Image (cartoon, rainbow, N blue to C red):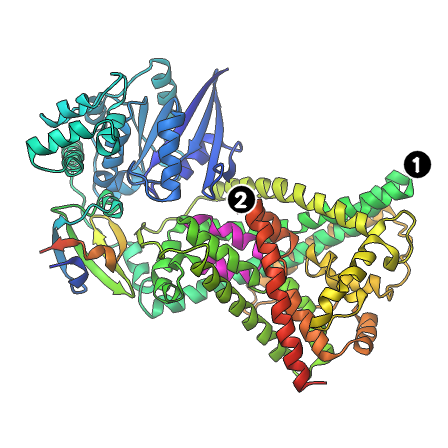
């Protein structure tokens, strides 16, 4: 499943991130990395709010669709 | 004195600025990085025999630069090479932060690690083995608390020690065969590991080595190095963190229930903005009025008297009174507003609330092609365009920033409101509706401008939205004050010099040729008469009105005063005889009074700043104006005043933030747009009202 399809409130594990876009490297640098658990807190407009360890992150859906989760 | 150049590097929101504040004390400076609109904060520490220059780099997650601020940080580290890098880490998010640490180590610049927010980490049950981290990386590690300043002195000592002993961090070695391929990319044998990796990733010179590597291992180099770095960060984290964090339900969770709620969040945002506005304007307005009076009724006459005693001629005295007291004094009256707004903006910035607003509002803003972050500067524009333009500093993409800056001047500010209410009250039965229409027209002009720019010079898609929502934090009083002072210094210096210069020009226009008595015969009057044909199609065919548009460029509220002068309705200036000690006492009393009113206004539940007071000389001007011009002309004049050329303060700050070319082009554009809109309004309204 892609991260942008995950329902609000669900915790998922990141299996891999597809693509070479630099923006994805930044996403990874911010902590969204393979093997990490993230919780989808809410979806609003084009953005998704995620919880990861002690931080909260916002990414847009067009980025989330490159992120595979299970 | 031995000079050391230090760069603070770290992820966004890890508290670098707070550490800089404690390091630099009052030597804190804010400005821009050359050529870009990314804010630069720097400071100086004098310690024993050392002068340490500290530069706060923009917050970055990785040394793979994408946005403007990331390029700034990257270029500084790789090209200017500071003597020492201080890597600031948010201890409770250490695993994430360690990626940047590794990339910094690859640069092989002497380094110190500052484990910041150690108190927050302890609350979460995180314990770091500092000695183990030092041993593994070969860099000194200092625990600090950026809020209180605890540990900052140790940080300074560590910087000096690293500098003096030329302590180089341990060279990072990746696994074989990756490591030997990286070394093969070397040509001079002197490149740092970071340079080699970058070369192998992007350079043509190393393309053979990269192909060879990818053939042998069967995977992309970029993926390999990324995985190695992540693994290293993960390994380091597990090695030095004693207890794993416990998740706690704290303040942040509670506040986010409201602030991030899809509906309550919007309501909370509007409430917060209302409070910010109310405090900023209600608190500063009485102080601005006082300062204005103090400068014009006390300092001005005092200076004039002093100069007269010294036997200085009339012309020079007149020049100093108008260009110096009028110009520099005018800038000074902005200070209470700017200072109050900055206190509030710094609170908002440090509190971590701003990224949440961007998140909540993005769904509306991106529909009209704007980034969620543009909400705040645009709203501030309704208060005063000058700090609104400054507030765009928090935006990352240059394109988004330029878009917002081009929209701000059309947000009508209270200075324009003064003029609107004067005209609207004379000519229209329902002035409030006219004023409301003008505000809407301003917003429409802003949106039109954004659409034009988006389809021409500022093409491209709205930047992606990726950002972190940090936990809620409060800056200390001391840090807030120091930052406000740094901003004020910057504002006074740059805006002051420019406004002073412009004032000289306008003063010259009004007083030349020498000995001019009637404004009609002055250069300004001549210019006014020359430009009248331009304004004729929009209904302004009186040189007196067009001439008064010239000083209006200084500040909108001057329009009424200068109209009064030009229409020669103002009484002869009384020779102000002042009794220095008595006036001084009066001024002190009124200052105390101004503070009292400021506090009362701030506490009262309704906003006070928008209650418009009539200028004293308005009464006589009113009767003249009502006889000489017709309602469509008045409407056209107001529209033109709303749209054309932002005031000098805004112009100055635009010049400073985005450059001369942009500021001047914008001036021309707004003039043309103002003319077109006035033309339409004038001719349409002529059909309805005559």
Q: Residues within 10 Å of mark 1 (few under 14, many from 20)?
A: few
Around disc 2, counting alpha carbons within 10 Å, would you say few (fewer than 14), some (14 to 19), or many (20 or more)? many
Q: What range is drawn magenta here?
A: B375-395
Q: CA distance from mark 2 to mark 1?
A: 41 Å
Q: Going 65% across and 82% down the picture, which residue do you hit?
A: B430
Quadrant in which the C terminus of chain B is drawn: bottom right
Q: Residue furthest top?
A: B165
Image coords of residue B239 (percent x, y)? 14, 31
SS at mark 2 in the image: helix
Q: In the rendered view, tell whether residue B347 sits above or below residue B139.
A: below
Q: Can residue B148 be seen in this snapshot?
A: no
Residue indicated by mark 1: B311
State the image coordinates of residue B648 (x, y, percent, origin top left): 65, 52
In front here: B304 or B376? B376
User: Residue B389: within the magenta?
Assistant: yes
Which disc, if any, is residue B484? 2
Which of the numbered marks, if any, corresponds to residue A45?
Answer: none
Image coords of residue B501 (percent x, y): 71, 43
In the figure, is residue B656 to the left or right of B207?
Answer: right
Q: Nearer the viewer, residue B679 or B114?
A: B679
Q: Between residue B663 and residue A54, name the one nearer to us.
A: B663
Which is nearer the N-term, disc 2 or disc 1?
A: 1
Q: Secondary structure at mark 1?
A: loop
Main SS, magenta residues: helix
Where residue A3 appears, x then y in whole percent?
A: 17, 58
User: In the picture provided, is B338 more to the left or to the right than B116?
Assistant: right
**B571 horizontally vs B208: left or right:** right
């Amino acid at each position: 499943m892609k991260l942008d399809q995950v329902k609000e409130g669900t915790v998922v594990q990141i299996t891999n991130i597809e693509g070479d876009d630099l923006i994805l490297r930044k996403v990874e640098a911010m902590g969204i990395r393979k093997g990490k658990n993230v919780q989808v807190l809410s979806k609003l407009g084009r953005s998704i709010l995620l919880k990861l360890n002690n931080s909260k992150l916002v990414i847009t859906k067009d980025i989330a669709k490159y992120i595979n989760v299970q | 004195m031995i000079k050391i150049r230090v760069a603070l590097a770290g992820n966004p929101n890890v508290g670098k600025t707070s550490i800089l504040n404690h390091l630099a004390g009052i030597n804190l400076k804010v400005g821009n990085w050359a050529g870009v609109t990314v804010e630069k904060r720097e400071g100086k520490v004098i310690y024993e025999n050392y002068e340490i220059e500290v530069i706060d780099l923009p917050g970055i997650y990785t040394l793979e630069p994408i946005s403007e601020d990331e390029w700034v940080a990257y270029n500084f580290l790789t090209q200017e090479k500071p003597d020492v890098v201080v890597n600031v880490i948010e201890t409770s998010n250490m695993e994430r932060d360690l990626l940047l640490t590794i990339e910094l180590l690859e640069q092989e610049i002497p380094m110190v690690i500052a484990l910041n927010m150690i108190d927050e980490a302890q609350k979460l049950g995180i314990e770091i083995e500092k000695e183990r981290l030092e041993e593994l990386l070969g860099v000194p590690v200092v625990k600090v608390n950026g809020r209180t300043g605890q540990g900052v002195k140790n940080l300074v000592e560590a910087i000096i020690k690293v500098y003096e002993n030329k302590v180089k961090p341990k060279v990072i070695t990746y696994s074989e065969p990756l490591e030997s391929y990286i070394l093969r990319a070397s040509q001079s044998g002197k490149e740092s590991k970071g340079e080699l990796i970058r070369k192998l990733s992007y350079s043509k010179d190393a393309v053979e080595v990269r192909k060879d590597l990818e053939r042998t291992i069967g995977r992309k180099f970029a993926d390999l190095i990324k995985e190695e770095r992540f693994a290293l960060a993960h390994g380091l984290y597990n090695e030095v963190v004693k207890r794993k964090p416990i998740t706690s339900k704290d303040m942040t969770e509670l506040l986010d229930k409201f602030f991030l709620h899809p509906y309550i969040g919007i309501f909370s945002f509007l409430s917060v903005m209302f409070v910010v506005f109310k405090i900023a304007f209600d608190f500063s307005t009485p102080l601005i009025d006082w300062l204005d009076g103090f400068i014009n009724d006390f300092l001005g006459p005092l200076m004039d008297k002093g100069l007269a005693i010294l036997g200085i001629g009339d012309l020079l005295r007149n020049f100093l009174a108008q260009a110096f007291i009028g110009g520099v004094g005018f800038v000074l009256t902005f200070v209470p507003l700017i200072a109050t707004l900055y206190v509030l903006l710094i609170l908002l910035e440090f509190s971590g609330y701003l990224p949440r607003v961007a998140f909540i509002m993005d769904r509306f803003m991106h529909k009209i092609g704007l980034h969620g972050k543009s909400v705040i500067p645009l709203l501030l524009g309704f208060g005063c365009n000058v700090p609104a333009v400054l507030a765009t500093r928090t935006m990352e993409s240059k394109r988004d920033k330029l878009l917002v800056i081009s929209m701000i001047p059309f947000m009508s500010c209270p200075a324009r409101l003064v003029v609107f209410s004067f005209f609207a009250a004379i000519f229209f039965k329902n002035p409030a509706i006219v004023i409301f229409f003008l505000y809407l027209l301003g917003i429409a002009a802003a949106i039109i401008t954004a659409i034009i720019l988006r389809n021409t010079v500022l093409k491209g898609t709205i930047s992606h939205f990726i950002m972190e929502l940090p936990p809620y934090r409060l800056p200390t009083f001391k840090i807030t004050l120091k930052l406000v002072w740094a901003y004020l210094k910057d504002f006074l210096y740059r805006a002051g010099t420019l406004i002073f210069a412009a004032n000289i020009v306008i003063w010259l226009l009004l007083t030349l040729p020498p000995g001019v008595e009637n404004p009609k015969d002055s250069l300004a009057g001549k210019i006014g008469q020359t430009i009248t044909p331009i304004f004729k199609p929009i209904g302004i065919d009186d040189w007196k009105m067009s001439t008064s548009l010239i000083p209006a460029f200084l500040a909108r509220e001057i329009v009424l005063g200068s109209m009064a002068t030009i229409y020669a309705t103002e009484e002869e200036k009384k020779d102000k005889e002042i009794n220095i000690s008595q006036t001084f006492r009066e001024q002190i009393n009124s200052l105390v009074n101004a503070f009292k009113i400021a506090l009362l206004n701030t506490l009262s539940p309704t906003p006070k700043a928008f209650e418009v007071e009539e200028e004293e000389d308005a009464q006589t001007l009113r009767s003249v104006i009502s006889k000489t011009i017709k309602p469509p002309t008045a409407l056209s004049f107001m529209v033109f005043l709303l749209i054309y050329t932002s005031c000098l303060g805004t112009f100055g700050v635009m010049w400073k933030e985005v450059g001369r070319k942009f500021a001047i082009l914008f001036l021309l554009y707004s003039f043309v747009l103002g003319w077109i809109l006035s033309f339409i309004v004038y001719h349409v309204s002529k059909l309805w009202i005559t």
